[in-house]
Image (spheres, grey):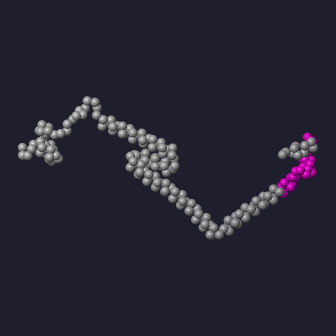
């Protein structure tokens, strides 16, 4: 609200400051400058007194209250440390489990951390990566173990006298030690 709104048509271009002050003091709808200053001084005085009372109250706190606040602060700090250590322990234990499942150390750490933090999006992303690598590994092993067309599928692994005679003496002795009954069936007793 401004002066023109308060005084309306009574405010003219000829109005002096003294006239303005008189008009404002005479207007009951507004507070005079003196009254405003008095109220402001009283408000400032009350704010200072309140600040002094707060200082006195804090100064008068008993040692027991101070100790209680310090104990609570320490308990909060210990609870935070405990939560951090519990989380780290959980990550370490889960890392070991994931490594035993076939994860490499880096992937095991990532997936264990995501699990401990409840970040399921990252957890499942790491699972997808692991599964893709595992499938790739199994496919490679399957390809390595698959016989190519034309390989001899009817390969006879039974030992014959001819095969044995092409072996070195050392290989023959090793075969005889590892397969004594088969060796005897080939050469017979004392041949």
Number of marks present in the image shown? 0
- Report whether residue 151 is seen: yes
12 left or right of 78? right
Residue 53 x, y percent position in the rendering: 73, 64
How far across and down, in percent of the image, does residue 22 sit?
A: 92, 50
Q: Compared to 89, does 5 lie above or below? A: above
Is 34 or 143 nearer to us in this picture? 143
Would you place residue 10 above or below residue 42 in this image?
A: above
Pick whichever, 79 or 45, lies toward us. Answer: 79
Please report the bounds of the magenta region as a residue range. 12-38
Q: Residue at x 51, y 59 (%)?
A: 82
Determine the residue positioned at 15% across, 44% down: 182
Q: Percent x, y for residue 51?
A: 72, 61
Does residue 174 appear in the picture of this structure?
A: no
State whether residue 180 is above or below residue 79: above
Q: Position of residue 91 (x, y in %)?
A: 46, 52
Residue at point 62% right, 66% down?
Answer: 66
Is 36 covered by the magenta stretch? Answer: yes
Q: On the rendered structure, is 54 left or right of 147?
A: right
- Image point 70% across, 66% down: which residue? 56
Looking at the image, residue 100 sits to the left or right of residue 46; the answer is left
């Amino acid at each position: 609200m401004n002066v023109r709104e308060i005084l309306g048509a009574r405010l003219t271009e000829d109005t002096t400051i003294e006239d303005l002050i008189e008009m404002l003091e005479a207007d009951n709808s507004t507070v005079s400058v003196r009254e405003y200053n008095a109220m402001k001084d009283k408000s400032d005085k009350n704010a200072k007194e309140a600040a002094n009372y707060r200082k006195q109250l804090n100064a008068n706190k008993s040692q027991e209250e101070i100790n209680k606040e310090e104990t609570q602060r320490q308990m909060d700090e210990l609870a935070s440390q405990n939560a951090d250590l519990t989380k780290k322990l959980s990550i370490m234990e889960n890392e070991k489990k994931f490594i035993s499942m076939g994860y490499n150390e880096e992937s095991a750490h990532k997936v264990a951390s995501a699990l401990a933090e409840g970040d399921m999006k990252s957890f499942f992303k790491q699972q997808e990566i692991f599964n893709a690598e595992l499938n790739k590994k199994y496919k490679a092993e399957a390809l390595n173990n698959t016989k190519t067309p034309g390989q001899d599928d009817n390969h006879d692994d039974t030992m014959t006298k001819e095969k044995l005679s092409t072996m070195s003496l050392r290989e023959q002795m090793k075969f005889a030690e590892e397969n004594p009954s088969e060796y005897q069936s080939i050469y017979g007793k004392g041949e």
